[in-house]
Image (cartoon, rainbow, N blue to C red):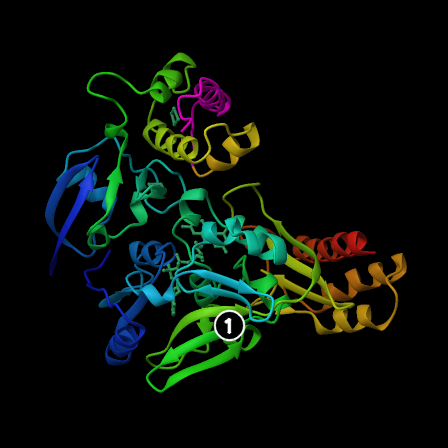
Amino acid sequence: MEYRVRFYVNNEPIELSVPANRTLLSVLREDLALTGTKEGCGAGECGACTIIMDGKAVNACLILAPELDGKHIETVEGLANGSELSPLQESFIEHMALQCGFCTPGMLMSAESLLRENPHPTRAEIVDAMSGNLCRCTGYKKIVEAIEAVAEKGVYEK
Amino acid sequence: MKEFQYLLPHTVAEAVALKEKYDKAAVFMAGATDVVVRMRDYLLTPEYVIDLKAIPELGGITFSKEKGLHIGALATMNEICADENVKQYYPTLAKAAGSVGSKQVRNRATCIGNIVNASPLADTATPLYCYDAIVEIAGPNGTRELPITEFILFVRKVALERGEMVTGIRVPFKEAQGEFCKISRRDQVDLSTVCGTVLKIDGTYRVAMGSVAPQPRRLPKTEALLNGAPLTPERIEEAAQLATTEVSPIDDVRADKQYRLDMVAYIVRNALGKLA
Ligand SMILES: Cc1cc2nc3c(=O)[nH]c(=O)nc-3n(C[C@H](O)[C@H](O)[C@H](O)COP(=O)(O)OP(=O)(O)OC[C@H]3O[C@@H](n4cnc5c(N)ncnc54)[C@H](O)[C@@H]3O)c2cc1C
Ligand code: FES
Ligand code: FES
C-alpha cells in the first residue's frame, strides 16, 4: 500500500506516493536524489543522516515515509545559496573540520540547528549538541572550532 | 523493514478502536526511536503501525503545585528537559530525560514511549518510580490509572490490556531533594550500565535503580533503613551495601554483575552524601 505525501524539501514542494516501510532517509537519497544526507548506521546512533524537520534536528533514518505529509525538511543541500556556501560551510573548510567528509552533512545540520536556537553557544553546549554525530576522522576538535568561529562572527544573531 | 499499513488516528478513541481491532498485529508509535529500530532489525514485524502523533489531546506538559506534573504521551525528551517547571520542581526527571540518546533522538523520543518500551535501563523510569508517578491509561472500557511500579511488569512487558494505550503520566508534586545518576561507558549517547535516583521527600528517602533487574526497581529495605534514623556516615555505608542485596544484575555487553553492584553502592553513597 502506498501513501500520498505532500511536503517541502528546502522550500521546494514535493508530492510522492510512498510505502510505509521506507524511511525519510531513503526517500531523500533514492527518490529525490538528494545524496548529501548520508546513511551510516541506519539506527539513530551516528547522526550522518541528520536533517532539520519543522525546525528541529532529527535522524532521517528513524522517520517513516508516511510521516512526511505536511512537513518542512531542510537538508545540507539547502544550506548554500546557489554556488555560495553558507558561513558555517565556509568555516568548516577554513578550519579543516573534515577529512573524508562522510559525517560532514550531518555535522553541518546539527550545528545549523544549534546556532539557530543558540547563536552564541558555549563550548560545552556545542559538544552536547554535536554528541549525536560521530566522526571517524577528525577527532572533533576542529569541528568544534569551526562552529565556535562562525558563532563569534555573529551571523546567527536574530 | 517488513511491509505494514500506516494508520494515523486523530483522537484517542480512534486509536483505541484500531488497537482493539488489530490487537497484536498492530503497534503504537510515538517518537519511533524504539519502534523503527526494532522494525528495521525485524525484531518487530507488525501488520499495522498506529502513529499517535496526530492526536492533539496527547501533547503537552502541564504543572501546578495542586495537580502536580502532567506529561502527555507526545511530550518529547527535549521538551521535558527544557521545561521550566520540570527543571525547577523535578530536576532529577529533567536530568534523566536530557541524558537519553542524542539531541536528535530527544527531539523525537517521548517519555511515555520510554516507559511503555519497558527496557530495564529506561532512563526516565527511576525518577518517576521515586515520585510515585501514575500512568494514565485509555482503553475500550474507558480510562484507568496504575502506579508506575505496577505498570512495568518485566523486560518489555507492561500492564496494558487489549486495545489500551497510555495517554499520559502524572507526577505528584512533592518538595524533593536528591539526584539522578547515569553510569554509562561513554558520557554522551550511550545506554545506562546502571542508572538510579535517590530522593528525600518530606524527610523520607526513596531509592530506585535501573538496569540491575528485569525491570526498574524501588529498594524498600534500603528506604526503610534510611527512614529509621539520622543520616550518619555509618548509616550511608550500611544503606549502600544493603542496596546491593535488593538488585539482581546480570553480566552483559555493557558490564559484568560485580561492576553493576559496585555502581549501585556508589550511586546510593554519593547521593546520600550530598543529602547528609
Ligand atoms: C540512538 C538511540 C539512543 C538511545 N538512547 C537511550 C538512552 O540513553 N536511554 C534510554 O532510556 N533510551 C534510549 N533509547 C531508546 C528510546 O529512544 C527511548 O526508549 C524512547 O524514549 C522511546 O520513545 P519513543 O517515543 O521514540 O517510542 P516509540 O519507539 O514510538 O515506542 C516505544 C514503545 O512504546 C509504545 N508506545 C509509545 N507510545 C505509546 C502510548 N502512548 N501508549 C501505548 N504504547 C505506546 C510503542 O508501541 C513501543 O512499544 C535510544 C534510542 C536510540 C535509537
Ligand atoms: S544513519 Fe541515521 S543516525 Fe546513523
Ligand atoms: S570526516 Fe570522515 S567521518 Fe568525519
Q: Quadrant of ligand 1?
A: bottom left
Q: What residue does disc 1 label?
A: B154
Asked which quadrant contains residue A39, the reply is top left
Q: Is residue A106 above or below residue B242?
A: above
Q: Amino acid at mark 1?
A: Phe
Rendered image quadrant of residue A98? top left
Q: Quadrant of the C terminus of chain A?
A: top left
Q: Which residue does the image show at 40% across and 21% down from the upper left? A: A155
Q: Residues within 10 Å of mark 1 (few under 14, many from 20)?
A: some
A79 with respect to B166 (left or right): left
Q: Reply yes or no: does residue A154 show up in magenta.
A: yes
Q: Residue furthest bottom?
A: B141
Residue A26 visible to the viewer: yes
Q: Is residue B250 left or right of residue B26?
A: right
Residue B192 seen anywhere in this rendered image of the structure = no
Q: Residue at x 42, y 77 (%)?
A: B137
